[in-house]
Image (cartoon, rainbow, N blue to C red):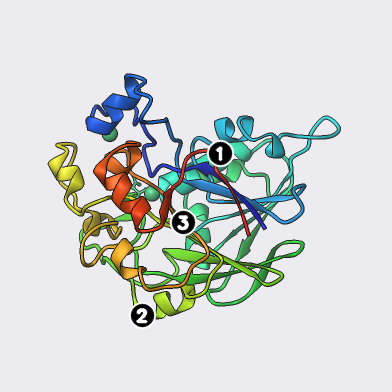
């Protein structure tokens, strides 16, 4: 199985268009300790020819341009992208679908609830149904994502997409709104979980022994955006567990046996984005890699 991190940042990207937080400012200034990152998406393949996108960021055009394996290869119209799978309905994960119009065939896969969100926004009707098949994927049922690549969606603690929030928001709900993806090829097992509000014993048990884990790295600490002076929301309120702290992902996953552990969906305020920061060093000491755009992983 080959994976490419197309976009390692969380919603907004790094730097974000309107942000001068401490990290974004360094990126705007071209500081060599930080590299720009686009929004949250990975691509996966088993043969290097046919690819599935998992999540489709508003930056998908740039991501395809920067990834030769995703360039059109033959005839006048072609794409190696055979499938697009969604893990939630956040803007950073669905916005790029609007760029995939123009009538190339692909499968668009998501839970029934996420498919309903797409159907509820008529702008996504730009995806021509003669070419784009929308498939509802039930939780916990194995399905074929690509020839030779089996997948399974499972609920993780999360919340509904920001733009769908009503007056009362349930945080940490487990259902069809926020899912993780299990990828299986031969005897290799990988997980992609870009959004997760909490670690549960069930989730930890599922991940045990995996060859590769790509996990929610949104924030270093829960009140990071408040301290950075860019917002009033905590990570918890946004449906993301933090990396650090007793309840954080580094501690929660420390005892698991994992072939490789990589943080993805990293918010632009997160100090791990700075190459020599104490937070980056602490994460790396704990065995974690910090994803960057173009990162190649295989298992
Ligand atoms: C998130 O991951 O919390 C969302 O992408 C936030 C957003 O929609 O901006
Ligand atoms: Mn996001
Ligand atoms: Zn910023």
Q: Which label's residue is closer to the chain start, 1 or 2?
A: 2
- 50 in relation to 74, above or below: below
Q: Quadrant of residue 71?
A: top right
Binning the other alpha carbons within 10 Å of mark 3 as few (below 14), some (14 to 19) or many (20 upward) gives some
Circle on res. 201:
2
Quarter that holds the C terminus: bottom right
Residue 96 is left or right of residue 84, and the answer is: left
Q: What residue would you read off at disc 1?
A: 294
Q: Which label's residue is closer to the chain start, 3 or 1?
A: 3
- Dot 3 beta carbon under 8 Å from ligand 1: no
Q: Position of residue 123 (x, y in %)?
A: 52, 42
- 64 in relation to 217, above or below: above
Q: Residue at x 86, y 32 (%)?
A: 75
**3 or 1: mark nearer the eye:** 1
Q: Residue at x 18, y 41 (%)?
A: 231
Q: Position of residue 227 (x, y in %)?
A: 13, 42
Q: Between residues 98 and 204, which one lies in front from this camera angle?
A: 204
Q: Secondary structure at mark 2?
A: helix
Q: Quadrant of residue 228?
A: top left
Residue 38 is left or right of residue 65, and the answer is: left
What's the distance in space between the residues labelled 3 and 1, CA to CA?
A: 30 Å
Q: What residue would you read off at disc 3?
A: 117
Q: Residue at x 19, y 46 (%)?
A: 224
Residue 40 is left or right of residue 268, and the answer is: right
């Amino acid at each position: 199985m080959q994976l490419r991190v197309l976009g390692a940042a969380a919603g907004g990207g790094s730097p974000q268009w309107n942000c001068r937080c401490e990290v974004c400012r360094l990126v705007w200034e071209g500081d060599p300790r930080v590299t720009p990152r686009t929004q949250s998406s990975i691509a996966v393949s088993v043969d290097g020819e046919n690819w599935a996108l998992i999540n489709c960021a508003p930056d998908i055009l740039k991501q395809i341009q920067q990834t030769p394996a995703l360039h059109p290869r033959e005839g006048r119209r072609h794409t190696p992208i055979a499938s697009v799978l969604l893990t939630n309905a956040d803007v950073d994960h669905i916005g790029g679908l609007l760029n995939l119009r123009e009538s190339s065939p692909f499968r668009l896969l998501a839970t029934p609830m996420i498919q309903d969100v797409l159907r509820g926004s008529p702008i996504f009707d730009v995806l021509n149904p003669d070419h784009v098949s929308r498939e509802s994927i039930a939780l916990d049922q194995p399905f074929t994502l690509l020839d030779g690549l089996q997948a399974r969606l499972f609920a993780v603690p999360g919340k509904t997409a920001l733009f769908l929030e009503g007056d009362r928001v349930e945080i940490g709900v487990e259902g069809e709104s926020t899912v993780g993806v299990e990828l299986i090829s031969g005897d290799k097992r990988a997980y992609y979980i870009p959004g997760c509000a909490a670690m549960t014993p069930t989730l930890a048990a599922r991940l045990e022994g995996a060859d590769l884990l790509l996990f929610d790295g949104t924030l270093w600490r829960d009140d990071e955006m408040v301290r950075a002076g860019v917002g009033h929301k905590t990570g918890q309120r946004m449906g993301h567990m933090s990396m650090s702290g007793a309840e954080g992902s580094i501690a929660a996953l420390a005892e698991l046996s994992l072939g490789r552990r990589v943080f993805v969906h990293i918010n632009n305020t997160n100090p791990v984005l700075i190459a020599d920061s104490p937070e980056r060093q602490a994460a790396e000491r704990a065995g974690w890699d910090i994803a960057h755009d173009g990162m190649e992983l295989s298992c």
